[in-house]
Amino acid sequence: MSETRRILTRLALMLALAAPAALPARDAPPAADDPATETRMTRIAAELRCLVCQNQTIADSNAPLAVDLRQQVREMIRRGDSDRQIVDYMTARYGDFVLYRPPFKGSTALLWFGPAALLAGGLAVLVVVLRRRNRLGADRFEPDEDVDEEPTT
Amino acid sequence: MKALKFVIPLILLVVLVVLLARGLKLDPREVPSPLIGKPAPAFALTRLDDASRTIRRDDLLGRVWVLNVWASWCAACRDEHPLLLDFAKRARVPILGLNYKDQRADGQAWLARFGDPYTASMWDGDGRVGIDFGVYGVPETFVIDKTGTVRFKHIGALTPDVMATRIEPLLKQLDV
């Protein structure tokens, strides 16, 4: 119990120490003046892929393009654009690829249904195999090893 | 029936191998641009060499032109530069440079040092027009037709192969 607590305390300390280092040293994030705008910007940016470093979101990335796009989102929020309009603005320029949750349409059907189809296919094969085995006589299988049995020498 | 049991998994395996091999060859950085077949975004930018003169998208309507996004801080731009210089000598189309997120002085010095293939370069200091064009990796090259429609986009440094097999034939097809 106390061991866990000690580890947690250490972990928290490590994180607290690491956090300032993770922030960019120069140019502090611009315009954090309005927390509501900032929260909404972060929420939208977390749904958008940064094209420079493709496995990060625009909210996470410090690539110059991501910084610019966050600023763009801030400006659009201040202008009173809806979330939809902001996302449309991004897809008009960078394509559906920027969306971490791609829209459902013909070209993405495989993406959405592929895993489920594979799972269903696997289950179907499993059911067929099990049924077929069920119909086989007991003599077709190797007898179970009985652990209670006296060892035959 | 027995043969089928052997052939079906084999076919599945071959299909899988082909798909994976294809996947290995795809470059995940080459994101298809949604701008292809759409009007080029409107812009009005000052010239890199003259802040008092503005170039607008509509100035170029009625002409086929090439847009090349470059910056003095971009290493790959240096790689493709000889190709552009060579292309500029032969080209019958204007080549416009978009000096992306650069300092004016740096951009001008870069052109003075490595040569200037551009009919004109526009200065996009804050990268706003770059964003409108969906630029995410400099250099990028666009071909825009007479109606102002984006016809082609290449991401990354141009290669002799891209020039010969994509850009030159497209320009020919667009009748210049």
Image: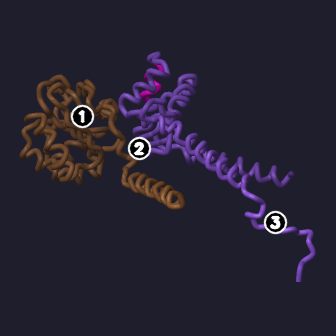
Q: Say which element carries label 3.
A: loop
- Which residue appears farthest toward the bottom when viewing the image? A153
Instruction: Return the disc, 3 or 2, that comes first in the chain's sequence.
Output: 2
Mark 2 surroundings: few (<14), some (14-19) or many (≥20) residues within 10 A: some
Which residue bears the numbered disc 3? A144
Give percent across and percent down for residue B155. 29, 44
Tag nearer the camera, 3 or 2: 3
Which residue bears the numbered disc 2? A52
Residue A73 falls inside the magenta stretch: yes
* Residue A4 appears anywhere in the view: yes
Residue A54 located left or right of residue A121: left
Residues at circles 2 and 1 in contact by the CB criterion of under 8 Å: no
Query: What secondary structure do most residues of the magenta stretch adopt?
Result: helix
Q: Is residue B6 above or below residue A75?
A: below
Identify the residue at horizontal 53%, vertical 34% (top origin): A46
* Residue B128 appears anywhere in the view: no
Give percent across and percent down for residue B21. 40, 56
Give percent across and percent down for residue A43. 55, 29
Q: Colour of chain B?
A: brown
Q: Colour of chain A?
A: purple
Please tell me if label 3 and label 1 are on a single chain.
no
Q: Which residues are magenta?
A: A71-78
